[in-house]
């Protein structure tokens, strides 16, 4: 079973859709590294949501993939979202977009950082929290950074304001020289039982 690898600008997104054999993992490793070199990608997002078992071979291979990708100058972000928590496909795509924008900012401005996902259950509603944090240069003027079209890298300046619009809750803390932490939450849209 081949893993589809999507190219999105400077990013590659590999979505593992089912359990993989050892040979499939080897194939994924080769395919990702080839593409990172060919497209000069800056980061690779590997979505492991659909892998219900992560055995030691799989986790070792993913770690090796991340190391080999780093040697080629790119970073790897491994994400897994419990589908039972955000079942509507819409929300799933929304989460991936938010993760990819936040990851892109970390790679562009801070070089390294961390993204953590967690499941939320509060007073009967369920959702997902994403926290993206880095120890990079920080943002001197947060209000300016949240404005549509503001960019210090000559890009579109739509990342942060876009993530803010996509999510239900958005918090950012940063200061010059202090690193940046963005925390967002998306609540599951409950559908009435049929
Ligand atoms: N993690 C970060 N560390 C330091 N500065 C950041 C970080 N994330 C965003 N910024 C600053 O905030 C600005 C706005 O970010 P935003 O993601 O909205 O736009 P962009 O990255 O410039 O362009 P786009 O995301 O549309 O390609 C950036 O240009 C950068 O100056
Ligand atoms: Mg951005």
Image: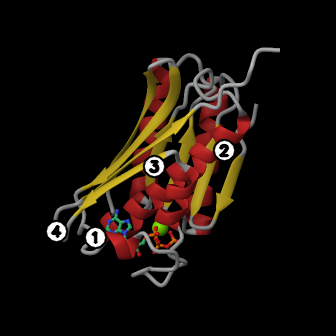
Q: Position of residue 4 (x, y in %)?
A: 72, 44
Q: Nearer the viewer, mark 1 or mark 3?
A: 1
Mark nearer the N terminus (1 vs 4): 1
Which quadrant of the rendered structure holds the C terminus?
A: top right
Mark nearer the N terminus (4 vs 3): 3
Name the residue that disc number 1 marks. Answer: 139
The answer to whether mark 4 and mark 3 are in CB contact below 8 A is: no
Q: Secondary structure at mark 2?
A: helix
Graded by Cα atoms within 10 Å as few (under 14), some (14 to 19) or many (20 or more), the crowding at tag 4 reads: few
Q: Secondary structure at mark 1?
A: loop
Name the residue that disc number 3 marks. Answer: 76
Query: Can residue 150 be seen?
Result: yes
Residue 80 position (above or below residue 124): below
Query: Can residue 30 be seen?
Result: no
Quarter of the rendering containing residue 180: bottom left
Q: CA distance from mark 1 to mark 4?
A: 8 Å
Q: Position of residue 52 (x, y in %)?
A: 59, 18
Name the residue that disc number 2 marks. Answer: 93
Residue in the foreground of this view, choosing between 92 and 169: 169
Name the residue that disc number 4 marks. Answer: 177
Ligand 1, by image quadrant, is bottom left
Q: Position of residue 193 (x, y in %)?
A: 76, 15
Q: Is residue 108 left or right of residue 15?
A: left
Mark nearer the N terminus (4 vs 2): 2
- Callout 1: CB less than 8 Å from ligand 1: yes
Q: Secondary structure at mark 3?
A: strand
Graded by Cα atoms within 10 Å as few (under 14), some (14 to 19) or many (20 or more), the crowding at tag 3 reads: many
Q: Secondary structure at mark 4?
A: loop
Mark nearer the N terminus (2 vs 3): 3
């Amino acid at each position: 079973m081949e893993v589809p690898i999507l190219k999105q600008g400077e990013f590659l997104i590999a979505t593992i859709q089912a359990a993989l054999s050892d040979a499939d993992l080897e194939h994924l490793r080769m395919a990702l590294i080839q593409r990172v070199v060919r497209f000069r990608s800056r980061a690779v997002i590997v979505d492991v949501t659909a892998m219900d078992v992560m055995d030691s071979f799989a986790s070792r291979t993913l770690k090796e993939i991340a190391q080999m990708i780093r040697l080629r100058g790119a970073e790897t972000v491994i994400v897994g979202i419990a589908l039972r928590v955000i079942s509507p496909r819409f929300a799933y795509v929304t989460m991936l977009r938010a993760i990819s924008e936040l990851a892109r900012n970390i790679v562009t401005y801070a070089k390294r950082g961390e993204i953590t996902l967690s499941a939320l259950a509060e007073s009967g509603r369920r959702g997902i929290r994403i926290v993206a944090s880095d120890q990079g240069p920080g943002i001197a003027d947060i209000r300016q950074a949240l404005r549509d079209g503001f960019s210090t890298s000559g890009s579109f300046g739509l990342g942060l304001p876009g993530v803010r619009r996509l999510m239900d809750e958005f918090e950012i803390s940063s200061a010059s020289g202090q690193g940046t932490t963005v925390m967002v939450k998306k609540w599951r849209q409950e559908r009435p039982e049929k």
